[in-house]
Image (tube, rainbow, N blue to C red):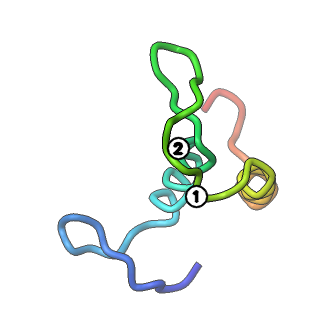
Amino acid sequence: MGNLGFRGHVGLELAVSNYQHILKNNLYYGMIYFGGEFYEGKHEPIVSKKLFDICQEVMTRKSKPHPEGD
């Protein structure tokens, strides 16, 4: 992914897994997950649901396969 210059709270460069965790957050398209259910947030979405879904598909395609049992 290369150095994008983003750093965590202790000043270290973020790992790819940090970016993946951030990009999986439903808040970006306006949904909140609470108590095992999704709710529409009162906040303005940052990205469309379509763009969010495309991002999820790309991350799934590009992720390394995990051996069974992991």
For the residue pair 27 and 64, the one nearer the viewer reads as 27
Q: Amino acid at mark 2?
A: Leu
For label 2, the crowd category at 10 Å Cα-Cα, with few meaning under 14, some 14 to 19 and many 20 or more, is some
x 50%, y 50%: residue: 21
Indicate whether 18 appears above or below 6.
above
- Which residue is labeled 2 in the image? 27
* Circle number at residue 46: 1
Secondary element at image label 2: helix
Q: Position of residue 65 (x, y in %)?
A: 74, 49
For label 1, the crowd category at 10 Å Cα-Cα, with few meaning under 14, some 14 to 19 and many 20 or more, is few
Q: How far is disc 2 from disc 1 in space, using C-alphas?
A: 8 Å
Secondary element at image label 1: loop
Left or right position of 2 against 10: right
Q: Amino acid at mark 1?
A: Ile
Q: Position of residue 18 (x, y in %)?
A: 45, 58
- Give the mark nearer the N terminus: 2 vs 1: 2
Indicate whether 53 appears above or below 7.
above
Q: Do tag 2 and tag 1 residues touch (Cβ < 8 Å)?
A: yes
